[in-house]
Amino acid sequence: MALTLPDLTTKIGPLSLQNPVIAASGTFGYGLEFEPLVDLNHLGAVVVKGLSLKPMAGNPPPRIVETPGGMLNAIGLANIGLEAFLKDKLPKLRKFTTPIIVNIYGHHTEEYGELAYGLKGVEGVAALEINISCPNVECGGMAFGIDPVTSARVTETVLKNTDKPVIVKLSPNVTDIKTVAKAVEAAGANALSLINTLTGMAIDVESRKPKLANIVGGLSGPAIKPIALYMVYQVARTVKIPVIGMGGIMDYRDALEFLMVGARAVEIGTANFVNPRVTLEVIEGIRNYCVENGIRKIGEIVGSLRTGSVTSNQ
């Protein structure tokens, strides 16, 4: 008898994915850099490196440092800008069947709107992911994502200027992420992705100086997974729109945890630096898990966490 493979397809609002594994923004370049190592057509989706209206050089080095169980980065959202992306990168990405999601960011609300409008009607862009962890110059540098009102305002502005599905990427550097999630949902977002990096720092005790030129950076990697998992668990139970989970996913078992707490898909970030083929391995691992456990559709795993009793492997 032929083996029946499980159905791994999932929907993120109006966006259909062949599987729930997405390459996260900022860790996969513009997708093309990984083409020699990964068949992009096998992924659920690719989120390209965050785009601003104009090219940005980012922060001065050193801007990446390894930490116990993770890494700090203060890249400063360096990117080639919208015009160069549309001219040089997107035409090459159109040959892939995998949905291409464009991550956008700005330093004031109107800038988000201009970026969204610049991508309106553009072939080959399947959705937008809004990075609201950026400093808001209108509010003295406070990140958009810290405040529910500004988060909702940015979401509404993008929605008014786009014909694409809109995913809002939430910051974990808040008192209550559920409040921001509900505000963004009420503003009309099609989906949420979380979490972005946690703010952290590292010191060189010999020189007594910060290891990053920017002093602080974003912490990612396995160290943040328990926090990310808890926040996804909270948000998935709070909103009705789809949730994409991320934060410290290194293998298929990590990915399964996020699906079990309610995420409909996952984004894999820092692990790409350790193992460039990790996305493909996670897809295969999820598929094998489904086969071994008699699961026919990936949806059977989503939100399947059992909280009645605690089990131990000891």
Image (cartoon, grey):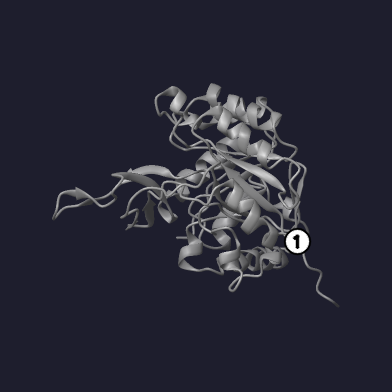
Residue type highlighted by circle 1: Thr
Horizontal side of 240 relative to 69 (left or right) equals: right
Where does the image place residue 107, in percent across and percent down from the top left? Answer: 49, 33
- Write down the quadrant of residue 166 in the picture: top right
Residue closer to the observer: 116 or 4: 116
- Write down the quadrant of residue 162 in the picture: top right
Give the secondary structure at mark 1: loop
Where does the image place residue 224, in percent across and percent down from the top left? Answer: 43, 49
Residue closer to the observer: 107 or 176: 107
x 41%, y 50%: residue: 75
Find disc 1 in the rendering and name its residue.
97
- Write down the quadrant of residue 39 in the picture: bottom right
Q: How busy is the neighbourhood of tag 1: few (under 14 within 10 Å), some, or many (20 plus)?
A: some
- Tell me how many marks there are: 1
x 75%, y 61%: residue: 97
Q: Give the residue furthest to the right.
A: 1
x 49%, y 55%: residue: 312
Horizontal side of 65 relative to 3 (left or right) equals: left
Residue closer to the observer: 206 or 235: 206
Where is 201 relative to 252, above or below? above
Evaluate whether residue 191 shows in this view.
Answer: no
Evaluate whether residue 139 shows in this view.
Answer: yes
Where does the image place residue 155, in percent across and percent down from the top left? Answer: 62, 30
The quarter of the picture where the C terminus appears is: bottom left
The quarter of the picture where the N terminus appears is: bottom right
Q: Give the residue furthest to the left.
A: 206
